[in-house]
Image: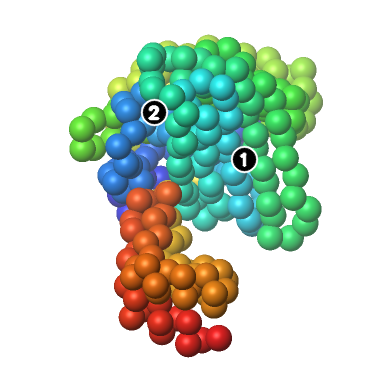
Amino acid sequence: MSQSDQLVRFLFREKDVRGEIVQVAASLDLMLQNHQYAQPVKQLLAELVAATSLLTATLKFEGQIAVQIQGDGPVKFAAVNGNNKQQFRGVVRMQSEVTGDSFLELIGQGFLLVTVTPDQGERYQGVIPVTGNSLSETLEAYFNQSEQLPTRIYLHTDIGEVHNKAAGLLLQVLPVDQDKAKHDFAELEQLTDTITAEELLTLAPEDMLYRLFHQEVVELFPAQKVEFVCGCSRDKCEAAIISLGQAAIEEHIAEGKLDISCEYCNTTYHFDSNALIQLARKF
């Protein structure tokens, strides 16, 4: 496992506060490599990957999570889907040219939607307006509304021509004695505010926590691998074609081919007339 593609949970033994650190690099490269997103759009999607990983780790469940931003700016829709195994995939849909690089210049007026679909239990969704001028601020507002637990989120990215990095750090009050917990949180938040982008992106979690909290007793839990998993395959495309029905397949046979592209990884699956004839014979 790449040291830079992992999530680590930690707990302050003498404070009522918990936290997480996520760092993503190689898997982020895999997600972005076949897309021609503008630099600010790549940065937004990379932040969303780190944020989704942090949100997934706060949920005690097995299942799926989708974190989406919908707006009236150049970015119409940005979403990252994740699961409890820290597997993710993401996509952006544009509706106009990018004219600025700030969060609000990309999104405009819009909403953050967080949809949780447990393997066991009911699906639920939280929706809040885009708040402030960063994804971090909007997510903090989401936690304040949905869980009513003080939460601080730090997100940083390093987007290059070939290689990319994203990292995030989350601090959150434990659901215990809130007066003591909020006091603890305020102290730790002040220390965490000193973290730099370079430190969050490059330091090993152990070194980062020692740098920030060397006077605290911090318990570090085993790292969890974070990876890009698109989920597309030729078999799934064949199933999708069969679901169109025999008449639709025969139309494509007459045209001589059918191409299906995955919006998450941009892989295109080609089906010539012979391949389509084979699928039509399944009826």
Residue 195 vertical position relative to residue 217 in the rendered view, above or below: above
For disc 1, the neighbor class at 10 Å (few under 14, some 14 to 19, many from 20) is some
- Quick one: label 2 or label 1, which is nearer the N terminus? 2
Where is residue 165? Give x, y as percent.
32, 34
- Residues marked 2 and 1 touching at CB (< 8 Å): no
Picture quadrant of residue 23: top left
Q: Could one spot residue 132 in this view of the protein?
A: yes
Amino acid at pointer 1: Thr
Residue drawn at (48%, 87%) of the image: 281
Q: Quadrant of the C terminus?
A: bottom right
Residue drawn at (70%, 18%) of the image: 182
Q: Nearer the viewer, mark 2 or mark 1?
A: 2
Where is residue 187? Give x, y as percent.
58, 14
Residue drawn at (54%, 77%) of the image: 246
Amino acid at pointer 2: Val
Per the image, label 1 sits on a secondary structure element best described as helix
Residue drawn at (78%, 53%) of the image: 122
Q: CA distance from mark 2 to mark 1?
A: 26 Å
Query: Could you tell whether 106 is left or right of 159 in the image?
Result: right
Where is residue 72? Give x, y as percent.
56, 22
Residue pointed to by mark 2: 41
> Of 275 and 15, which appears nearest the observer?
275
Where is residue 194? Give x, y as percent.
42, 13
Which color scheme did the rendering employ for the protein? rainbow
Query: Could you tell whether 75 is left or right of 182 in the image?
Result: left
Q: Which mark is residue 58?
A: 1
